[in-house]
Amino acid sequence: MSQPVPGQRPAAPEPLRLVQEFLNTRWERAGVEELDSPRGLLRWAAARGLVETDAPVGQSDLDLALALRDTLRELLAARRPVETGVLASLPLRCDIQAGRLVLVPDGAGITAALARILIAGVEAERDGRWERLKLCAAPDCRWAFYDPSRNRSATWCNMAVCGSRAKARSYYRRQRAASALPTPELRSPRRPRPPEPCRARAAPRHSWLRPAADPRRPRRGSRNRGPRRPG
């Protein structure tokens, strides 16, 4: 499936990209389902070189593929243990390659192709890339995307579309909640105080506004006895 919208995040590296493409065979927003029939499952697997174009595929193979996809999507959404009964139906065996113990598909056909998808997820879990594969937080999208950021904080598959829609809905909810709050009672405005009359203030005792006393004039309350005679 092609990218749902322009500006999509970069695809996951191999082999995790196989898991990402398998999860994105269903897209909620457009109502797209690539695995709608056994023939659709064969077409998808053959386009990726997992099986031959004339490999036999039946309804039971389709049911197994859908169960595996639902399990992986639930695991990404919950990040916790989920029902793993479908994994027991996949043909897997242990092998030693380059001195390492690895899982390999046991046999051929469409069930072996589904086993290769699960093995790709196990390898991504081992090298730490599985935590970067996420489902878009938008309920109407749920596109599987790869988060290449350093802190692994991406939430939406596309910030310009799913991210902006989520923020717009959040803003609308906050505005509605604020408008539903009871409005405070309006109080009558206070009457302005009338201006106080201007009163002349007495000049301070020691101020340049008070005229200086005449040194030749006797002070009030004292007697002018004249010059004092020597004794």
Image (tube, rainbow, N blue to C red):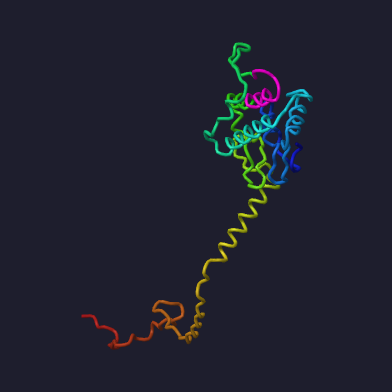
Residue at the image point whose x is 60% and y is 30% from the top: 130
86 and 20: which one is in front? 86
204 and 39: which one is in front? 39
Picture layout, residue 105 above or below residue 160: above
3 and 216: which one is in front? 3
Q: Is residue 106 magenta?
A: yes
2 and 210: which one is in front? 2
Image quadrant containing the N terminus: top right
Residue 107 in picture, x, y percent from top left: 67, 18
Q: Residue 228 is drawn in which quadrant?
A: bottom left
Q: Residue 7 is drawn in which quadrant?
A: top right
Q: Residue 85 is drawn in which quadrant?
A: top right
Specify the farthest residue to the top. Answer: 99
Residue 65 in picture, x, y percent from top left: 66, 31
Residue at the image point whose x is 54% and y is 33% from the top: 83
Residue 198 in picture, x, y percent from top left: 48, 86
Residue at the image point whose x is 72% and y is 45% from the top: 31
- Magenta: main secondary structure: helix
Q: Is residue 194 magenta?
A: no
Image quadrant containing the C terminus: bottom left
Residue 152 in picture, x, y percent from top left: 60, 36
User: Is residue 137 left or right of 4 when viewed as pictured?
Assistant: left
Picture layout, residue 89 above or below residue 185: above
Specify the farthest residue to the right. Answer: 53
Q: What is the tally of numbered marks visible in this picture?
A: 0
What residue span does the magenta drawing correspond to? 105-119
